[in-house]
Amino acid sequence: MTQISRPEASATASSLPGFEIIARLRRLLVVGAAAALGYSLFMTSGKGYCPGGVSADGGFLDAAGNPTDTAPMCVYLDLHPSPVIFIALAVIVFTAITMVLRRAADAPSAIRYLDRAAAAVAILAIASVVISQIWFALIPITDWDGTGTFFYPFPFGSVDLRTEPMSVG
């Protein structure tokens, strides 16, 4: 019986033992880097609110529309990536590599560990962006009266809060 050679398989496959594992490891690293980059890009957002305003004569108004001598305080929120997520992504990748080295009995089990880790990395990055952006959008910034607490999307995102007096002009 003659064996038919497949040029497409020989062009992509290596004769190196364990090449499938190395290819999946490379894929895990690429997915990890892409997830970290995508998470960084989609985790930047901001919003602000100034209760009150400026009257026709140039004086300040409070949130109720009453004249006041002091400028109303404005609140600004900025959403940024959380270092916790970057650490979690790295932990997933290194844990998968460690599991392959310690527990994988054969190539298929090693590939399963690496594939599951790549899926976990992608899911964590996507879920973190979705949770953070929705949570950030739902922060009731217009209800802010200068006191109180905002609940932020920790650990999925990091929020910076700035308050400063309203500027005229």
Image (cartoon, grey):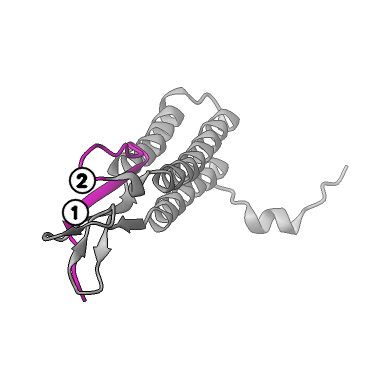
Q: Which residue is mark 1?
A: 163
The residue at 46%/23% (across/down) is 103
Question: Can I make out residue 85 in this image?
Answer: yes
Q: Quadrant of the C terminus?
A: bottom left
Q: Nearer the viewer, residue 116 or 107?
A: 116
Observer-side mark, 1 or 2, equals 2
Looking at the image, residue 116 lies above or below residue 12: above
Q: Is residue 38 left or right of residue 68?
A: right
Residue farthest to the left, as pictured: 69
Q: Nearer the viewer, residue 149 or 3?
A: 149
**How many angstroms separate mark 1 from mark 2 (CA)?**
9 Å
Q: Secondary structure at mark 1?
A: strand
Main SS, magenta residues: loop
Residue 38: x percent and y percent? 44, 55
Tell me the kind of residue under disc 1.
Thr
The residue at 36%/56% (across/down) is 44
Question: Can I make out residue 17 in this image?
Answer: no
Q: In terms of sequence position, does the residue under pointer 1 or pointer 2 come before the other?
A: 2
Q: Quadrant of the N terminus?
A: top right
Tell me the kind of residue under disc 2.
Gly
Circle 1: is it few (<14), some (14-19), or many (20+) Cα within 10 Å?
Answer: some
The residue range painted magenta reads: 145-169
In reply to whether residue 161 is colored magenta, the answer given is yes
The residue at 37%/44% (across/down) is 140
Residue 78: x percent and y percent? 30, 54
Q: Which residue is mark 2?
A: 146
Looking at the image, residue 38 lies above or below residue 143: below
Residue 21: x percent and y percent? 53, 40
Circle 2: is it few (<14), some (14-19), or many (20+) Cα within 10 Å?
Answer: few
